Amino acid sequence: MNPRENGHGDGSGARRAALFDVDGTLVDTNYLHAVTWWEAFRQTGHTVPMWRIHHTIGMSSDRLVDHLLGEDRDRSQDDRIRSTHTALYATYFTRLQALEGAADLLRAVADRGRHIVLASSASEDELAAMRAAIGADELTADALSSDDVGTGKPAPDLVERALERAGVPPEDAVFVGDTVWDVKAARKAGVPCVALLSGGVPHEVLADAGAAEIYQSPADLLANLDRSALAH
């Protein structure tokens, strides 16, 4: 049997999992999100600096708006802000680019016996577009989006659902992400987080959040896979 089919490729018999964020981790989208959120805020009369928006990428959309506009705001425009961002970002769907080494990393992790689950704060439609960009459908069938949980990152709900989907306890999983919110969500769920710099978050910020390991990109993690947490 192909090890990619059962997650037991190391011969140990113990099921292990690799849980992957997608935006900024496997697909180069974080700055597209920053631009389209900036425009969505602008169209609804809000001036929000793009650097602040970038720092919130990886949060669920409701938490992102709360963080940037404050929880005591007039919420009458919230649906318009989110729908404007959704429409603007959708114009990029056919042009999304996987980060170098993304598909090869997934294949290498699967070959080492880990069951792969995507755990993304993106909507189902956005996640489908990113899966198409990665081009490794045989490895990304187990995929969770923001539509699958009530509360998004940095709450642990999405990571916990991914653990359920994989059928493993936290100690038998590793989460791979690129933002502080990924690290915090994983740690709250009891899962170590391997962080990538490909989303634009500085090394020291990810380290301070509690990332177990930090690599430049999917390609860098792939090159160092045998000495990473994913090899154990």
Image (cartoon, rainbow, N blue to C red):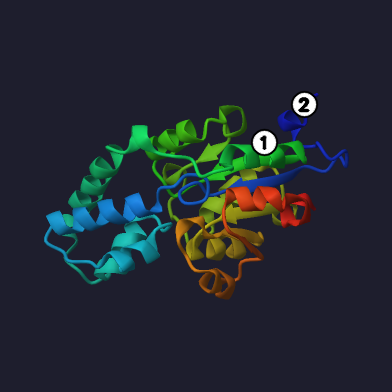
Q: Residues within 10 Å of mark 1 (few under 14, many from 20)?
A: some
- Is residue 155 visible in the rendered image? The answer is no
Q: Residue furthest top?
A: 1
- The three-letter amino acid code for the residue at tag 1 is Arg
Q: Nearer the viewer, residue 159 or 56?
A: 56
Q: Nearer the viewer, residue 62 or 228?
A: 228
- The three-letter amino acid code for the residue at tag 2 is Asn
- Is residue 193 visible in the rendered image? The answer is yes
Whole-number angstrom distance, CA of label 1 to CA of label 2: 12 Å
Residue for point 61% across, 27% down: 138
Residue for point 56% across, 75% down: 208
Residue 73 in the image, given as x and y percentages of width and height: 20, 69
Numbered disc 2: secondary structure: loop
Residue 89 in the image, given as x and y percentages of width and height: 29, 43
How many callouts does the rendering have? 2
Q: Nearer the viewer, residue 128 or 217?
A: 217
Residue 144 in the image, given as x and y percentages of width and height: 51, 41
Identify the disc placed on residue 107: 1
Q: Is residue 59 left or right of residue 40?
A: right
Q: Image height check: is 168 above or below 215?
A: above
Q: Nearer the viewer, residue 69 or 28?
A: 28
Numbered disc 1: secondary structure: helix
Residue 95 in the image, given as x and y percentages of width and height: 36, 35
Q: Residues within 10 Å of mark 2 (few under 14, many from 20)?
A: few
Q: Is residue 189 left or right of residue 120?
A: right
Residue for point 23% across, 45% down: 83
Question: Quarter holding the N terminus?
Answer: top right
Q: Which residue is mark 2?
A: 2
Residue mark closest to the camera, 1 vs 2? 1
